[in-house]
Image (cartoon, rainbow, N blue to C red):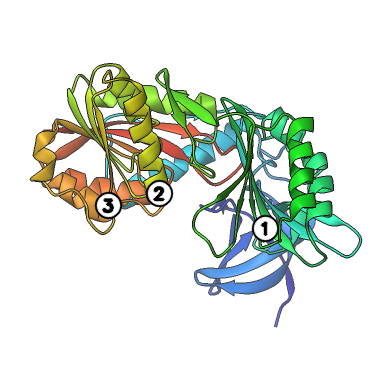
Amino acid sequence: MRHELEVVIEEIGARGDGIARLEGEGKLYIPYTVPGDRVRVRLGEARAEGQAARVVALLASGEGRSSPACRHFGSCGGCALQHLDASHYQAWKLELLVGSLTRQNIVAGEIRPLLVMPPGSRRRAELTAVRRKRDLVLGFNARLSHQVIPLAECPVLRPAIAGLMRPLNELLMALLEPAARAQVMVTESDSGLDLLLTTDAALGLKRRERLAEFAAAHDLARISRRHPKARGAELVLERRSVRASFGGIAVELPPGAFLQPTAEGEAVLRRAVEEALRDAPRIADLYAGCGTFGLPLAAAGRQVQAFEEERDLVEALAGAARASAGRLRLSAEARDLERRPLAPAELEACDAAILDPPRAGAKAQAAALAASKLACIASVSCNPATFARDARLLLDGGYRLDWVQPVDQFLWSPHLELVGAFHRE
């Protein structure tokens, strides 16, 4: 059996791996390669659709290869495509969308140019910390591994988050016992940095004092702690209310609340949603989150009914509405739309809908929307494959897909955000 062989990369797959084909043996998936590369590879584990392999030697470079922006590229699993130059990278990323639509036999009226957010704009990081006997490792996991790669830099993160890495390492070294692990979420909110630690470490008085000193030294707005087996989070300290503003409306964010990865990308998505909904006066905001899209519309005088499964996010939305002293026509309801999608009869009270589900999409809710009489739907997605699957249901229900706006907020990764504008024929 062959363990090493020479191959030529033909294309880049959906996960960012280069793909080579072996006659009679299927595909090889080889990370950090570009089309046209001639490489010697060592075969690895089987994959459902082929076999993994890793590069032993680059024998000849294909077109589009570029120097990575980060010293950790190739070991850290956070980025998959820093080795592609900008034009080839953007063409590949756009193909993620085009290919997904094609597989569902969907022709959009227009696919707009890809908008790529700049380096240093990611305002949220989810890190892993591992306490070893004499030191601590803090960073992202290696690709397809539980091994944590210590980070000395990260060109995708906002400077305030990247600059916190070394102090965080020192803090967690003091908080965690040897062999302990923790998940660390750092978010840059409008109020400053918000830190959420997920750990089973006991936080006694001395450790809480250490956390308070850390927050003051680095001007953190809040520190919260979540036990790995618990759903909610405990507030450790709050120096300022953690807030985000949507359309000029401030929302108090619960610990770990979802925000769009970049402020710049959020603005692009919001404008696209507003364009897709035209002048519809009554809007159902499905998978509303903390009001990223619904609140600006309510602030502009639209009537918004928001539905969200997470109760702390529902309360945050309701709190923003109460604080407006009646200025916002917004209601918020806790509802699991996967299990209980809004039925066509319930949607009759609205003229349009925003659909912004998680990566798995919203098959049940899309089917209900397809059977409704809504004039327009703004579909927001972070997964072109599930977007296309759900779009097929809407098109079969009598909608047309006028345009799609792709937005790259996860730079150098296989992820892609987008907004699709659906209108009734």
In the figure, residue 182 lies in which quadrant?
A: bottom right
Disc 1 marks which amino acid?
Answer: Arg
Residue 97's x, y, as percent?
Answer: 41, 42
Residue, disc 1: 143
**Quadrant including the C terminus:** top left
Disc 3 marks which amino acid?
Answer: Leu
Residue 238's x, y, as percent?
Answer: 62, 36
Circle on res. 337:
3
Left or right: where does residue 175 sit relative to residue 185?
right
Residue, disc 2: 358
Foreground disc of the pair 2, 1:
2
Up the image or down, 290 lies above or below 177; here it is above
Residue at x-position 63% and y-position 67%: 52
In the figure, residue 283 lies in which quadrant?
A: top left
Q: CA distance from mark 2 to mark 1?
A: 22 Å
Residue 14's x, y, as percent?
Answer: 51, 52
Q: Residues within 10 Å of mark 3 (few under 14, many from 20)?
A: some
